[in-house]
Every structure is written in C-alpha cells, then in structure tokens.
Amino acid sequence: MQEGIHPGYHHVVFRDRPAGYAFLTRSTATPTATIEWEDGRTYPVVDVDVSSASHPFWTGTARVLDSEGRVERFERRYGRRAAPRRGRGLSR
C-alpha cells in the first residue's frame, strides 16, 4: 500500500434526524460537524436523509405494485382480442 494516497478510515456517527436514529461506525467520510456520543467521546457526524429506521422497505410501509391489476387495466384499455381464425379455403 502506498503512503499518503488513501483516505483516512476513522469512527463516524451517521445520524437520521427525522427518525431520531444514529449509529457509530467506521468510514472514510470527512464531515465538518461533530457530536458527543454515548461513550463521552466526540466523533464527526454525517446527517443522512434515509436510514434503515426510516426507509419504507425496512419499516414495512412500502407499497407493493399489483401486477395483476396492471394486466386487467391493459385489457380494459385495449380490449381482449379474439384469437385469429385460420384462413378459409386453405387446405393443409
């Protein structure tokens, strides 16, 4: 590994303010703000918009698309076409 070309890997707090959730991990992010953590130490903090505490998939509030409803809407819009008839007068 070459010296001086890799970013620093240090403890960082990621905070989801709307959900009131924060966790301490290691990252190469270099934020400018700091926060005092539960252990009494001060760590850099990164505010995130969405985390596992507020994401619809992880909280169970995600909407599920109804693929059957899409097919019904397509058939209602374009109608169900009858199967094509075999040609008349053609012997096989």
Image (cartoon, rainbow, N blue to C red):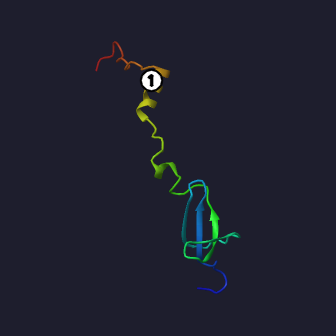
- The total of numbered circles placed on residues is 1
Q: Secondary structure at mark 1?
A: helix
Rendered residue at 66%/81% (across/down)? 5
Rendered residue at 58%/72% (across/down)? 37
Question: Residue most toward the left?
Answer: 92
Q: Position of residue 61 (x, y in %)?
A: 47, 45
Q: Position of residue 4 (x, y in %)?
A: 67, 84
Q: Quadrant of residue 1?
A: bottom right
Residue 4, above or below 74: below
Question: Residue most toward the top?
Answer: 89
| Left or right: 16 as drawn, with respect to 63 | right
User: Disc 1 marks which residue?
Assistant: 75
Pick the residue in front: 70 or 45. Answer: 45
Q: Quadrant of residue 6?
A: bottom right
Residue 84, above or below 71: above
Rendered residue at 45%/47% (across/down)? 60
Quarter that holds the C terminus = top left
Q: Amino acid at mark 1?
A: Glu
Tell me if mark 1 has few (under 14), some (14-19) or many (20+) residues whose alpha carbon lies within 10 angstroms of its own: few
Q: Position of residue 16 (x, y in %)?
A: 59, 58
Pick the residue in front: 92 or 83. Answer: 83
| Left or right: 82 as drawn, with respect to 74 | left
Q: Position of residue 12 (x, y in %)?
A: 60, 72
